[in-house]
Image: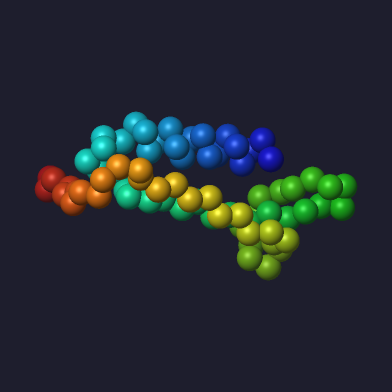
Amino acid sequence: MLMIKEISKKVVGNLEDTPPEFRPSQMELTFNLLLTMNGKAVITKSENEKNLKVMLMWKDKGEETEKEIPEK
C-alpha cells in the first residue's frame, strides 16, 4: 500500500504545482489491484486479473470559476 500512497502524493503534488486557473475542478485516479497468495497487493493493468478496483478522487474546495486555456 506504500506504492498507492506515493502515487497519490505525486498526483496531489502535480495538482498543487499547477497554477490555480488551470487546475481541474476534480481529478480521479483509478487502478486495479491483484491480491497474491502470500497476502501482497500488486497493481495490475488488466481488468481480467483484478481482485479490487481502487478509485481515488480529489475535488477542488474553492469556488467554481471558468478556466480558459490560452492559445499558443
* 36 vs 16: above or below: below
Estimate the x, y position of residue 3 in percent, counting from the top left.
64, 38
Estimate the x, y position of residue 7 in percent, counting from the top left.
55, 39
Estimate the x, y position of residue 8 in percent, counting from the top left.
53, 40
In the displayed structure, does residue 45 sit left or right of residue 18? right
Q: Residue at x 69, y 40 (%)?
A: 1
Q: Which quadrant of the structure image shows residue 34?
A: bottom right
> Which residue, as the protein is rendered here, is positioned at the far bottom?
48
Tell me which colouring the rendered structure shows.
rainbow
Q: Residue at x 46, y 40 (%)?
A: 11
> Which residue, as the protein is rendered here, is positioned at the far right?
38
* 37 vs 22: above or below: below
> Which one is nearer the viewer's eye here, 37 or 25?
25
Q: Which quadrant of the structure image shows residue 50?
A: bottom right
Q: How many marks?
A: 0
The quarter of the image holding the C terminus is: top left
Q: Residue at x 22, y 41 (%)?
A: 21
In the displayed structure, does residue 65 sit left or right of residue 25? left
In the displayed structure, does residue 27 sit left or right of residue 64? right
Estimate the x, y position of residue 37 in percent, counting from the top left.
87, 53
> Which one is nearer the viewer's eye here, 33 or 66?
66
* 59 vs 14: above or below: below
